[in-house]
Amino acid sequence: MMRIGMVCYPTFGGSGVVATELGKALAKQGHHVHFITYEQPVRLGSFHENVFYHEVHVADYPLFDYPPYALILASKMVDVVRHEKLDLIHVHYAIPHASSAFLAQNILREQGIKLPIITTLHGTDITLLGKDPSFEPVIAFAINQSNAVTAVSKSLQAETLETFEVNRPVKVIPNFFCPSHFAAGRNEAMRKVYAPKGEKLLIHVSNFRPVKRVLDVVRVFAKVRESLPAKLLMVGDGPDRAAVETLCRELSICEDVVLLGKLKNPIEAISTADLFVLPSESESFGLAALEAMAAGVPVVASDTGGIPEVVEHGTSGLLSIVGDIDKMAENALEILSTKERHDAFIAGALKNADTFRVDRIVPQYEALYLQLVQ
Ligand code: GMT
C-alpha cells in the first residue's frame, strides 16, 4: 500500500477528471489517496474507501490583488506529506503544481523527509501556456526537477521535448476510461426528449475556449442538418458560448441546438448521442472523444495533436484537417449515412476505446510510483 498525494485542478477540465479517476482507481487497489486542491474535484463524488480530500484555503488578504496560490499549495503539500506520511506526490498539469511540488520537496528535504514527485503533462500546460515566456523558465525548471514526468500522448511527449530542454525521460501514459461509468448504456428516455422525431443527435463537450473551435461545431452541424434531420447538444461553458449563441441565431438553427451548460457527469449526455464532434485547434489527447468512444459514439474530429492516437481514422471515427468544416460535415454524413455504416463505427468505437480501459493504464502509473519509492 502506498500513500499518494494527488494534486490537480478540481474543475471540469480533463486533467482534473483523469487525476480524480486515477485516484479512485488506486484507492480501489488499497492505496491511500489524498487529493490536495482548492475545491472538491467535480468527479470525486461523495464517499470512497481510502480517498481523502485536503482543501487548500486561499487567504483573502487586502494586500493581494492576486493571492499566491502556488505558495499556499506548497505549504499545504508540506503539511499533508508530514502528517499523512505520504510516499509521493503526483501533480497533474504542470502550472503551477510542478513548481509548488518542487518547493514542498525542498522544504521537506530540510526536515529530513524524502518526497518523490511525478508530474503529468496534460496539454495546454505545454502547448499553450508552457511556451509563454511568462511561464517558460519556471515550467522548464519544474519539469526537470520532477523525479518522473509523464505525458498523456506521444504527440504531447514530442511537443514537450521540442519546447523545453528536458533532461529526463518523458514517459507516455495515455488517459483511460472506467467501463463501470458506461454500464447504463444509451439513455433512450433522454433521446426522446432531445430527438423526439428520431433525428440524429450530435454532441460536443468542452470548456468553450478558443482552442476548442466551438463555432466549427455549429457550422458542421448546420451543414449536416441541410442533409438530414438532426439536433445538436452542446455541453459545457466558457468564453465562446455567447459567440455560439449568436451564430445559431444568425444561421436560424436555434430550435435544433441545445446548450446544456456544464454537467457534472457528461457521460450521461454523451451516451444519448449518435455522433461526437471535436474540431479542436489542438488537443493533446481528447478525453471527451475517448469517453464518447467508450459510450459507443463515433467521433468526427480534427487530425491534430494526440487525437489520431485516440480516434482511429476509419474505425472509431473520421478525422480531417483543422478548420475544414465541409470535410467534417461530409465525414459526419458518411458515418450517419446508413444504419450499417453507423453500426460499424459504433463497434469500432467500442473496440478502439477498449485499449484505454482503466485496468490497462492504471498499473502503468502504479509501476512508476513503485520505482520512485523504492
Ligand atoms: O485545455 C483543456 O482542454 C483542458 C485540459 C485540462 O486541464 O483538462 O485538457 C488537456 O488535458 C486533457 C486530459 O489529459 C486532454 O484530454 C486534453 O486533450 C487537453 N487539452 C488540450 O490539449 C487542449
Image: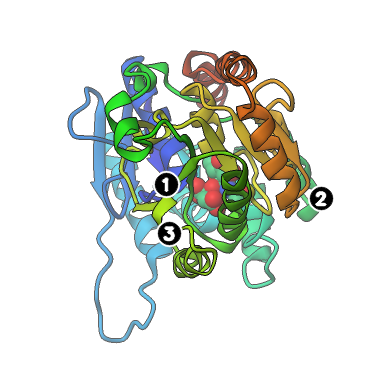
Q: Residues within 10 Å of mark 1 (few under 14, many from 20)?
A: many
Q: Quadrant of residue 83?
A: top left
Which residue is identified by label 2? 162
Identify the mark nearer the N-term, 1 or 3.
1
Q: Nearer the viewer, residue 220 or 166?
A: 220
Residue 171 visible? The answer is no
In whole angstroms, how far apart are the C-alphas of marks 2 and 1?
A: 25 Å
Q: Which mark is residue 253?
A: none
Q: Amino acid at mark 2?
A: Glu
Which residue is identified by label 1? 8
What kind of element bears circle 2?
helix
Q: Which mark is residue 254?
A: 3
In whole angstroms, how far apart are the C-alphas of marks 1 and 3?
A: 36 Å
Q: Nearer the viewer, residue 289 or 172?
A: 289
Colouring method of the image: rainbow
Residue 41, horizontal then vertical, whole percent = 31, 44
